[in-house]
Amino acid sequence: MLSQYKFWTSLSFRIYNVNEMPELPDVETIKNELSPHVTGHQFTEVEVFQEGAVQELSAQEFSRRLVGQTIGDIGRRGKYMLFRLSGKETLIIHLRMTGVLLLEPSPRPYKHTTAIFRLDGGVNVHFIDQRKLGWLWLVDDESAVTGKLGPEPLEPSFTTATLHNIVNKRNIPIKALLLDQHAIAGIGNMYTDEALFYARIHPLKRANTLSNKEIKLLHEGIMEVLKRGIRNKGASVDTYRLPNGQRGRAQTEFNVAHRRRERCFVCGSPIEWVKIAGRGTCFCPSCQHNDTM
């Protein structure tokens, strides 16, 4: 287990220079890695240190209602983690910008701890969040929190035709559309850059001007980069870590994301950077030429 001191001090520079929140492959990885350690376990104590993280309930009521419930399974919707409980409620966690969930033997809080979930059998899950932006819910109905999210891109129902219908309705940059969680759930900034590079689409190109061929390639790209990200257990370019403290490897296979001014692996052109919808965007100006600009 990576010591908490080393974990946070090693990230103190990057956190103010990268600012990437966990995206679909990262959250899916946390779910997959955490599940065997917590499923079937009962909450024995919940301690909240950042009361503002708890939504709609007081921190005291949130903790009281969790204690005694057993985790049946863990799901994911977009970037939200869903802990479905024996009492028919769901604990929902959104890690936001810098949140991580770590399995720790120590029951004591570390620096930047938002909450500690103590389970039977000595299992402790620490929600650590340096910027204190993460959210916690305990709800009877998951859809009250996740109901407005768009389709899940890795579900079989997300077809090329589905994507075609989404992009044809919007006269905005395709990068901005893919970041819209109400349009498609979970893709996020890094993997959007990678999917657009796969399809050779400029991020500023208007969504409703994409050709059928481009939409087909973009659909393939979304599938490929998300599945590759999950295989590589997420991207550790910022604070993201697996529950055991280890780093993900997805960033080692990025073609454009976080490679500003580096050379494109395909054509050798310098990777360029532009801000779209408030997010830093990396692309290759040669491979991703915008023919509508």
Image (tube, grey):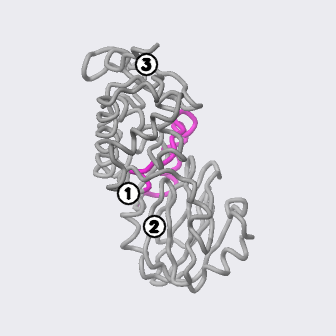
- Find the distance from the CA under tag 3 to the CA under tag 2: 38 Å
Crowdedness of circle 3 by 10 Å Cα count: few (<14), some, many (20+)?
Answer: some
Helix or strand or loop: what does disc 2 sit on?
strand
Please determine whether, in this image, residue 69 is positioned above or below residue 168: below
Residue at 40%, 61% (x, y): give it.
Answer: 244
**Quick one: SS at disc 3?**
strand
Mark positioned earlier in the residue sequence (3 or 1): 1
Residue at image x 47%, y 76%?
123
**Upstream in the sequence, badge 3 or badge 2?**
2
Numbered disc in front, either 3 or 2: 3
N-term-proximal mark, 2 vs 1 = 1
Q: Position of residue 208 (x, y in %)?
A: 46, 28
Residue 20 location in percent, x, y? 51, 40
Residue extending furthest left? 266
Spatial CA distance of label 3 from label 1 is 29 Å
Q: Which residue is mark 2?
A: 103
Residue 115, position in %: x, y? 61, 66
Whether residue 140 is visible here, answered yes or no, is yes
The answer to whether 226 is drawn above or below residue 82 in the figure is above
Tell me, yes or no, whether the highlighted magenta stretch contains residue 144. Answer: no
Give the crowd class for mark 1: few <14, some 14-19, many >=20 residues within 10 Å: many
Magenta region, residue range:
1-27
Query: Most extreme residue toward the bottom, as rendered?
Result: 68
Q: Amino acid at mark 2?
A: Leu
Q: What amino acid is at disc 3? A: Glu
Q: Which residue is mark 1?
A: 29
Query: Is the N terminus in the top left, top right, bottom left or bottom right quadrant?
Result: bottom left
